[in-house]
Image (cartoon, coloured by chain):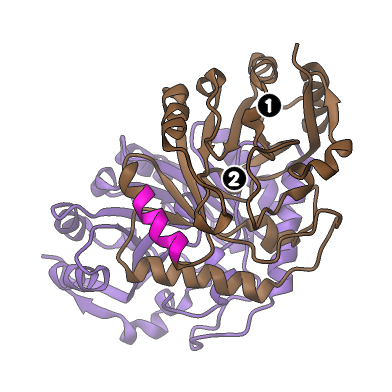
Chain colours: A purple, B brown
Amino acid sequence: MTTLRIAEIFGPTIQGEGALIGAPTVFVRAGGCDYRCSWCDSLHAVDSEYRHEWAPMQPEDVWQKVRDLSGDKPLTVTVSGGNPAIQDFGPLIALGKAQGYGFALETQGSVARDWFAELEMLVLSPKPPSSGETVDWAVFDTCLAKAGDAPTVLKIVIFDDADYAWARDVAARYPALPLYLQPGNHTPPPPDAEDAVIDMDGIMDRMTWLVDKTLADGWYSPRILPQLHVLLWGNKRGV
Amino acid sequence: MTTLRIAEIFGPTIQGEGALIGAPTVFVRAGGCDYRCSWCDSLHAVDSEYRHEWAPMQPEDVWQKVRDLSGDKPLTVTVSGGNPAIQDFGPLIALGKAQGYGFALETQGSVARDWFAELEMLVLSPKPPSSGETVDWAVFDTCLAKAGDAPTVLKIVIFDDADYAWARDVAARYPALPLYLQPGNHTPPPPDAEDAVIDMDGIMDRMTWLVDKTLADGWYSPRILPQLHVLLWGNKRGV
């Protein structure tokens, strides 16, 4: 089977973002990413400088760790990264589903996989202009097609007016997809820090800015949510 | 038509609690309640001492105010209270639905109404032991029956271990209903204050206590969410 590069596995905790906010979950964070967003808040799982910290694991070993953490009680496993879609998580998902677990996957939509159709939820998070990255919409659409009937949502991080305008365009392109807007974390943790200081007032200001702007525009279809885990635990890792 | 007693109408803002957290909404807060929870955070809409502040309004007038606030762009209207189910919101809901709006109703489930079936979402919030109130489960079940196919969720506020144990029993009674657990606000605003001071550290502590307890029990079916509006705006009213 495929060897997976895993940056961290932790939980159970609650999902802090988007459609599953508040839901108990175990996180499997894949190492490696085809993007390098300017404001990445998970560089320890992205920058190849940290590659030596990513454990090569067989799907069975990842699965055993999830079982241990969850006490063998089924829940939704969140697979994030980095971009987990650059690796083959199909075998892990098959192992988990056979035991009643579900899987939510978070990816930017730059790599399409047949196993997206096996997900409990596909969270596509196309990166806005402030990231410095560019979305290939043809590939993005292939991701949507691969998901098939699996529930799929959009999550867009917004740092500034340009990101906001871009998000409106994306929403117009995919009117049927539930959309979650999330203010950016402008004080992301440096990758070496386990529990970096955070500018909580600034986080709150950016959230209220985004709420006010969206509502003032009469744009009522997206949900607007902060990173709840940052509010609760700051930039601390492993929660 | 029915005259409604309305404590306040405000928005658009985002829903701060439960299943629709983060969703743009206009709140219509009904005046009056058949309960008197010990820790009520909306006494200005409950205590009859404030009855003179509740505006007698026709459904058409309430509706016009919602249209004005939302700029005539359809969204989800949240009807809360007090207990809105002690009044007849059927005519208001009919007016709004005819113009493409949806309605979410928050009630403890002590009064059942035929118009529950017209809701976009029925949020039933049975009150735990710490409230000092007692749930009549026969009436509660009638509320569920009246909702019919309308999406229905449970939201339970938890202040202490006894509330938590009670919530587990309620969850076992209604395994098919999505359940949202919410830590109690132990510093609710006094009804005369527009923007009372809040113990934010205490709020956070109660949230992490509830998260830790639920996860340690391996109880993974409920979502655990704070009152987002309190985190963002404290006890300020009208947001």
Q: In the rendered structure, the residue with mark 2 lies on which chain?
A: A
Where residue A187 appears, as percent x and y from the top left, is 64, 76
Residue annotated with mark 1: B74
In this picture, residue A60 sits left or right of residue B212: left
Q: Quadrant of the N terminus of chain B?
A: top right
Q: How many other residues sit within 10 Å of disc 1, few (<14), some (14-19) or many (≥20)?
A: many
In this picture, residue B182 sits left or right of residue A160: left
Residue depicted at x 44% and y 74% = A239
Residue depicted at x 56% and y 80% = A189
Q: Is residue B164 magenta?
A: yes
Residue annotated with mark 2: A223
Where residue B200 appears, as percent x and y from the top left, is 68, 72
The residue nearer to you, when weighing A238 against A131, is: A238
**Disc 2 residue type (three-letter):** Arg
Q: Quadrant of residue B216?
A: bottom left
Residue A233's tag is: none
Residue depicted at x 20% and y 68% = A67
Alpha-carbon span between mark 1 and mark 2: 15 Å
